[in-house]
């Protein structure tokens, strides 16, 4: 019984963390190659490729925006981007 309660509590905490993360995007920036970088309110970044999938980008990598500016990847928040992209496809 304790194990079941612990699992339920952990699941609730995880669901709450994910729900909060959806509103944590400060802004999104389109890149020259068609991908999008999401900048979260804590300064970390995550990337969506041009096909709409959360994708890896090495921290420190220099990217070029559509308007020609250069930005440097800070972090690699794939799981946060994946949650944003699939928020309507997963059960609550």
Image: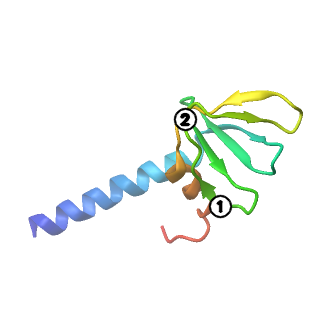
- The residue shown at (42%, 52%) is 16
Which is more toward the observer, 7 or 54? 54
Residue 12 in the image, given as x and y percentages of width and height: 34, 58
- The residue shown at (53%, 30%) is 42
Query: Which is nearer the N-term, disc 1 or disc 2?
Result: 1
Q: Indicate which label's residue lies in the foreground, 1 or 2.
A: 2
Horizontal side of residue 75 vs 71, given as left or right: left
Circle 1 SS class: loop
How many other residues sit within 10 Å of disc 2, few (<14), some (14-19) or many (≥20)? some
Q: Are marks 1 and 2 in contact (CB under 8 Å)?
A: no
The dot on residue 53 is 1
Which is more toward the observer, 84 or 73? 73
Which residue position is annotated with label 2?
Answer: 59
Horizontal side of residue 76 vs 37, given as left or right: left
Q: How many marks?
A: 2
Up the image or down, 22 lies above or below 41; here it is below
Up the image or down, 36 lies above or below 71; here it is below
Circle 2 SS class: loop
């Amino acid at each position: 019984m304790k194990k079941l309660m612990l699992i339920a509590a952990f699941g609730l905490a995880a669901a709450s963390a994910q729900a909060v993360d959806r509103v944590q995007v400060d802004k999104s920036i389109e890149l020259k190659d068609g991908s999008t970088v999401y900048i979260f309110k804590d300064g970390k970044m995550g990337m969506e490729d041009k096909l709409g999938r959360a994708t890896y980008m090495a921290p420190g990598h220099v990217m070029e925006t559509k308007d020609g500016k250069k930005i440097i990847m800070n972090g690699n928040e794939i799981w946060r981007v994946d949650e944003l992209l699939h928020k309507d496809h997963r059960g609550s």
